[in-house]
Amino acid sequence: MDREILNPPGVHPPQAHYSHVARVDKTLYISGQLAMDRSGAVVGVGDARAQARQCYANLATILAHYGGSLRHLVKTTTYITHWGFRPLVAAARDELFPSPPWRNRMGIGRASKIAAGIIFVVAALGVATPVLLVPLGLAVWVLGEAL
């Protein structure tokens, strides 16, 4: 089993003792992404849509490090500090994922504040290489290997 724990270039330094991503073989376990730019400054204080966009940009940066894109996400878990922000967060998500197939996801309506000004966080599970779904045979292939 090939394993790597990393903070890819282009995303903010972790705010505590954690890493942005743990890779086990071709699976990426991505930590919750905060609305912080690469220097660690909070983006969009008070603006849920701007924060969601930054969180997804961080995910895209991490996935790109492994040769992937947001289309390689398998599952996301989102956290917001107030249910009223949900429409703004959903609008930002829909900019990136406007049509099926959509990721498996879970939303948590009320999360405690993580850092001053943060109102949205997204954690994710992805694959390091493209996944091809073959609907006729209901098989999943990763680089030619059946799962």
Image (cartoon, rainbow, N blue to C red):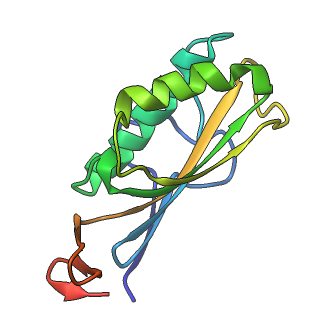
What x and y, as percent, mark residue 146?
24, 88
* Of the pair 85 and 102, the residue shown nearer to us: 102
Residue farthest to the left?
144
Which quadrant holds the N terminus? bottom left
Q: Residue at x 50, y 22 (%)?
A: 91
Q: Is residue 58 left or right of residue 15?
A: left
Q: Is residue 89 visible?
A: yes
29 to 12, vertically: above or below: below
* Of the pair 131 and 17, the residue shown nearer to us: 131
Q: Residue at x 70, y 21 (%)?
A: 85
Q: Quadrant of residue 73?
A: bottom left
Residue farthest to the front?
136
Q: Is residue 39 visible?
A: no
Q: Residue at x 29, y 81 (%)?
A: 138
Q: Is residue 109 left or right of residue 144?
A: right
What x and y, as percent, mark residue 107?
68, 44
Which quadrant holds the C terminus? bottom left
Give the tally of numbered discs.
Answer: 0
What x and y, as percent, mark residue 56?
45, 35
35 to 9, vertically: above or below: above
134 to 82, vertically: above or below: below
What x and y, as percent, mark residue 79?
70, 39
85 to 140, vertically: above or below: above
Q: Is residue 105 left or right of residue 79?
A: left
Q: Quadrant of residue 35?
A: top right
Q: Is residue 7 left or right of residue 127?
A: right
